[in-house]
């Protein structure tokens, strides 16, 4: 059964595609999502751990959480969903607007990836403007900056604003795309969950790829109730044939 049959006639006019992705696209790479039982770490709610308050209450605990996630992510491989998005660049302009901090889109070969919520391989000082990539394992947890204050993962925590340069670019890409694929995200978290609205305002075709309903399923032009590693290769095959 051809999942994307209903948009087949539009393929020839599609020049720019934006992907909005979340934890679900990395689920088939063994990375837990934030929902349901996956969303718990040592019985702490992931949404509560990813906050500045949790960090100042117990920086050691939050660092151990990110260390464990980082080890898991370093061992993970991009799946057919990530690879399909990277391959699509051969046929049309593709940008990836991801909420994921795992870097798997880049590992799959995607060249234009905006990390809306930061990256697990980056660190910064909680006080001074020191920033860097994680190069070595740290001797102490939490590790200290040369200014004496504690270092933190360079990710966006709840209650913190997104990096403005990245967010500005994301809004522009979303407003200029001809088609937006929303894959593997529940669209619960803002402002990332407003990106489909920018695309809709630009009369873009909206496609949702998700085994479950999301906050915006009713706004979609096409809903694919399947996993990203199964659906996205078929999506790309339509451009191959075209
Ligand atoms: C901000 C980085 C300005 C860290 C993350 C009250 C009401 C409304 C909004 C708010 C509110 N109070 C506060 C807010 C704003 C808040 C927010 O949206 N809260 C939510 C919980 C209501 N947002 C913020 O705080 C943002 N900043 O707004 O700044 C500001 C400042 C001060 C005060 C107000 C405003 C910052 C948000 C970023 C937080 N950082 N991550 C880290 O990762 O450790 S968010 C993190 O959680 C992820 O990055 C992602 O964004 C989110 C999880 O969502 P998903 O990725 O979608 O994952 P989820 O598990 O939910 O869903 C997975 C989906 O995949 C499911 O639908 C499932 O069916 C599907 N799936 C599963 N398997 C597959 C699949 N799909 C396809 N294939 C499969 N195989
Ligand atoms: Zn410092």
Image (tube, rainbow, N blue to C red):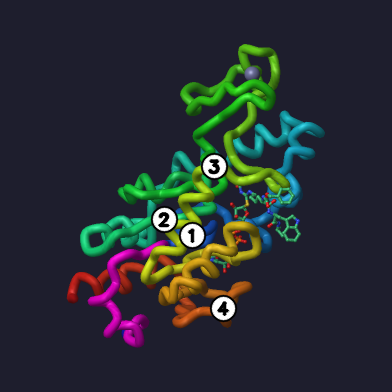
Residue visible at 57% across and 46% down in the picture = 117
Q: Secondary structure at mark 2?
A: strand
- Residue 216, given in percent of the width and then of the height, sits at 59, 75
Label 1 C-beta lies within 8 Å of the nearest ligand 1 atom: yes
In the image, residue 159 above or below residue 122: below
Measured in 3D between alpha carbons, the distance from the residue under mark 3 to the one under mark 4, in whole angstroms, is: 26 Å
- Residue 175, given in percent of the width and then of the height, sits at 45, 64
The earlier-in-sequence mark between 1 and 2 is 1
The earlier-in-sequence mark between 3 and 2 is 2
Q: Identify the magenta region.
A: 3-18
In the image, residue 58 above or below residue 129: below
Q: Secondary structure at mark 1?
A: strand
Reading the image, the residue beneath label 2 is: 96
Measured in 3D between alpha carbons, the distance from the residue under mark 1 to the one under mark 2, in whole angstroms, is: 7 Å
Q: In the picture provided, is 181 more to the left or to the right than 10? A: right
Reading the image, the residue beneath label 1 is: 21
Q: Quadrant of residue 53?
A: top right
Reading the image, the residue beneath label 3 is: 118
């Amino acid at each position: 059964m051809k999942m994307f049959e209903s948009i087949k006639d539009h393929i020839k006019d599609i020049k720019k595609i934006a992907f909005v992705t979340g934890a679900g696209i990395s689920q088939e790479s063994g990375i837990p999502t934030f929902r349901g039982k996956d969303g718990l770490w040592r019985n702490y709610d992931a949404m509560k751990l990813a906050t500045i308050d949790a960090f100042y209450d117990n920086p050691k605990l939050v660092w151990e959480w990110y260390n464990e996630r980082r080890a898991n992510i370093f061992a993970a491989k991009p799946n057919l969903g990530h690879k399909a998005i990277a391959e699509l660049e051969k046929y049309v302009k593709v940008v990836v607007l991801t909420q994921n901090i795992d870097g798997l889109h880049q590992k799959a070969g995607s060249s234009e990836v905006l990390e809306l919520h930061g990256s697990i391989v980056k660190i910064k000082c909680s006080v001074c403007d020191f920033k860097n990539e994680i190069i070595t394992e740290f001797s102490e947890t939490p590790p200290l900056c040369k200014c004496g204050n504690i270092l933190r993962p360079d990710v966006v925590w709840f209650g913190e604003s997104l990096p403005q340069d990245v967010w500005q670019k994301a809004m522009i890409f979303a407003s200029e795309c001809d088609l937006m694929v929303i894959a593997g995200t529940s669209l619960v978290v803002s402002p990332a969950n407003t990106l489909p609205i920018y695309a809709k305002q630009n009369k873009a075709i909206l496609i949702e790829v998700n085994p479950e309903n999301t906050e915006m399923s009713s706004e979609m032009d096409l809903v694919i109730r399947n996993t990203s590693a199964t659906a996205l290769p078929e999506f790309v095959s339509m451009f191959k044939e075209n």
